[in-house]
Image (tube, rainbow, N blue to C red):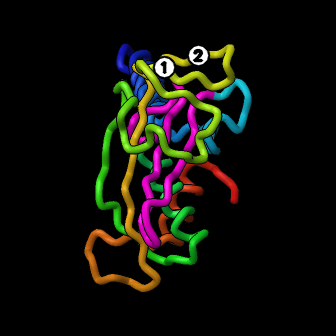
């Protein structure tokens, strides 16, 4: 009789733990994905800088809710979008730089006209609107240098633009 009393408690405990683990492993559906400064009140976003005919620097700054892995994925997604917009089908990430919490003055984006025109990078601060300041020391930020190809370059590190876009858009619930 005692075992019948404890057995439902074990089932409830197992179900509670399973629900907790499932909740912890789910992907956030409220991920902000867009250009830096595109949405008032939303920190983060992407920017890019064309370095050559087939090379770009892509930066993604996460908001305070994003993990490092989410920001890396969104940097990769933006890389695929940039390659696709320029009619490339493949790309290789030639350099990955974690700029999280760094003073960004003096990086390759400093003093260069990018899509990030509303920001002023200095002293670990990112002033987005003039009256709103975000302390970047606690936000994940990555920069990828990419080289693009029209055909499969045969490089084992090469990524198919369509596959990357489809997988990451699905994973994060991001529309076209």
Residues at marks 2 and 1 touching, judged by CB atoms closer than 8 Å: yes
Q: Residues within 10 Å of mark 1 (few under 14, many from 20)?
A: some
Q: Nearer the viewer, residue 8 or 33?
A: 33
Can you say which quadrant of the picture contains the C terminus?
Answer: bottom right
Relative side of 126 to 151, left or right: right
Residue occupied by mark 2: 133
Q: Nearer the viewer, residue 86 or 155?
A: 86
Relative side of 2 to 134, left or right: left
Residue 55's quadrant in the figure?
A: bottom left
Is residue 106 among what the camera can see? Answer: yes
Q: Which mark is residue 125?
A: 1
Q: Which mark is residue 110?
A: none
Dot 1 falls on a residue whose secondary structure is strand
Magenta-colored stretch includes residue 60 = yes
Is residue 8 among what the camera can see? Answer: no
Picture residue at 33% right of the left edge, 82% below the top:
153
Residue 35's quadrant in the figure?
A: top right
Q: Nearer the viewer, residue 148 or 63?
A: 148
CA gap, disc 2 and disc 1: 7 Å
Q: Which residues are magenta?
A: 43-71
- Residue 168 is situated, as x and y percent measured from the top left of the image, at 52, 56
């Amino acid at each position: 009789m005692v075992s019948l009393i404890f057995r439902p408690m074990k089932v409830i405990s197992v179900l509670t733990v399973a629900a907790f683990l499932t909740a912890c492993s789910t992907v956030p559906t409220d991920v902000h994905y867009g250009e830096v400064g595109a949405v008032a009140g939303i920190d983060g976003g992407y920017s890019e800088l064309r370095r050559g005919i087939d090379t770009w620097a892509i930066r993604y700054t996460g908001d305070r809710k994003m993990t490092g892995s989410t920001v890396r994925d969104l940097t990769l997604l933006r890389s695929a979008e940039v390659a696709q917009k320029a009619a490339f089908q493949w790309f290789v990430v030639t350099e990955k730089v974690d700029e999280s919490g760094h003073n960004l003055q003096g990086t390759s984006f400093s003093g260069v006209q990018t899509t990030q025109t509303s920001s002023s990078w200095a002293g670990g601060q990112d002033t987005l609107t003039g009256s709103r300041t975000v302390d970047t020391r606690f936000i994940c930020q990555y920069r990828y240098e990419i080289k693009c190809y029209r055909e499969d370059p045969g490089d084992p590190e090469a990524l198919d633009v369509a596959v990357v876009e489809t997988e990451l858009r699905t994973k994060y619930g991001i529309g076209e």
